[in-house]
Image (cartoon, rainbow, N blue to C red):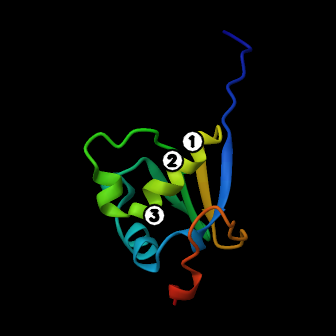
Amino acid sequence: MTDTLEWRRVLVLSTAHLRWETCKRLEEADPDNWPCAGAPIPYGFYIYAHDEDGDGQIEAFAPELWHALKFARKRGADYVQFDCDASPIDALPDFSSTHA
């Protein structure tokens, strides 16, 4: 047995950085069918900050999602928590005006 702790970094971003259609697709689809590793959580999504999209599935699914994941990875994050209560940041597009 080992006492080594494994740490992960999570960047919290607003769901406003995802298009309404993207949020809807993520909410309705089984996470096993998402083009990225993740899961819905109350009030948002928890997604692995992929640094490669070799077959282009994430970008084809939602370009803004792929952009946010690359943004997070470049800043040292392992995961992104998209949260509806988080404030949007200037560095990413804000789609809040398109949310229902």
Q: Residues within 10 Å of mark 2 (few under 14, many from 20)?
A: some
Whether residues under marks 1 and 2 lie with C-beta atoms below 8 angstroms apart, the answer is: yes
- On screen, residue 69 versus residue 53, left or right, reads right
User: In this view of the protein, which residue sits in the foreground, 94 or 19?
Assistant: 94
Badge number at residue 64: 3
Whether residues under marks 2 and 3 lie with C-beta atoms below 8 angstroms apart, the answer is: no
Disc 2 from disc 3: Cα separation: 10 Å
Kind of element beneath mark 1: helix
Specify the farthest residue to the bottom. Answer: 100
Q: Amino acid at mark 2?
A: Lys
Among the 4 quarters of the image, the one containing residue 95 = bottom right
Which residue carries the number 1 mark?
73
> Where residue 34 sits in the image (x, y, percent)?
35, 56
Q: Residues within 10 Å of mark 1 (few under 14, many from 20)?
A: many
Whether residues under marks 3 and 1 lie with C-beta atoms below 8 angstroms apart, the answer is: no
Task: First in sequence, mark 3 or 1: give its number.
Answer: 3
